[in-house]
Amino acid sequence: MKLLDIYKFLDELSPFELQEKWDNSGLMIGEFSHNIQKIALSIDVDEELIDSLEEDTLLITHHPIIFGGLKQLEFNKYPANLIQKMIRKNISNIAMHTNFDQTHLNNYVAQEVLGYKIVKKDGFIAYLEVNERFDEFASKISTIFKLPHAKVVKCHEQIENVALVTGSGCSLIKSIEADCFLTGDIKYHDAMEAKSINLSLIDIGHFESEHFFAQILEKHLKILGLKVIIASSKNPFTYI
């Protein structure tokens, strides 16, 4: 199957035009005329992943390997070191980032992973009705995402409703209309801001909340009749 045909299929599934202006989803590496027989799915690109892939594979990732503008390709620096290896193995790459967040990832995590019904959707934000004690809810969330501990800002003993944004969603804090906000990459100043507006926070991790990307997309790609493997990269963080 031509890479262009796969791209069109992905665009119908989760339109690339839905991506944020600052994003860079779409074709990263390759050419649309290339014939594809194998697809690998991963949240990110890393060296170990590239080494494990066969030549001529299409790698579909959640995060774009080329995010900002490239001014040079110095092959001992990121991301040029990875791009060089991919080109040598003729590995194509398509990224499905903020478009996929809106159409699939947040919904899947809310309903299939956490097991809550979405009562309202506002762009990236999925609102859930919870009605649980905060401490019990936070402990459950840590267990589900396999976090070593719950990193929280506690402003409520009881939470009625929750907002969810997978990955890094703290730029949306001002627009959250809930008792508690679940997202990743929560920083010190995010916590201070949330506390000042009485918004509880639970950090669900960036990798931990988004690594479901591959298993979601795999189900849709099966109809193409190509070999599809989940070859997710590893979380760069470890806990000791």
Image (tube, rainbow, N blue to C red):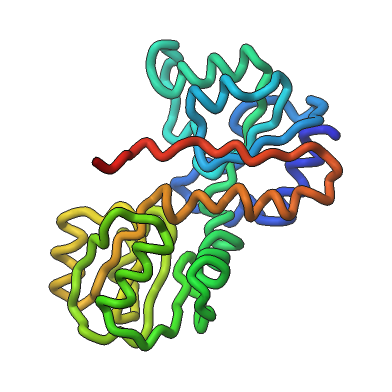
17 and 240: which one is in front? 240
Determine whether, in the image, residue 185 is placed left or right of residue 68: left
Above or below residue 117? Residue 148 is: above
Residue at (60%, 36%) from the top-left corner?
Answer: 231
Residue at (44%, 11%) from the top-left corner?
Answer: 75
Above or below residue 140? Residue 213 is: above
Q: Where is residue 30 shown, x and y percent of the image? A: 68, 25
Tell me where residue 102 sits by quadrant: bottom right
Q: Where is residue 169 shown, x and y percent of the image? A: 36, 59
Tell me where residue 25 sits by quadrant: top right
Above or below residue 209? Residue 90 is: above
Quarter holding the N terminus? top right
Residue at (61%, 53%) from the top-left corner?
Answer: 17
19 and 204: which one is in front? 204
Q: Where is residue 165 shown, x and y percent of the image? A: 42, 63
Q: Where is residue 108 shown, x and y percent of the image? A: 57, 65
Above or below residue 154? Residue 223 is: above
Residue at (56%, 15%) from the top-left corner?
Answer: 85
Quarter holding the C terminus? top left
Question: How many numbered marks have been drawn onto this rendered protein structure?
Answer: 0
173 and 59: which one is in front? 59
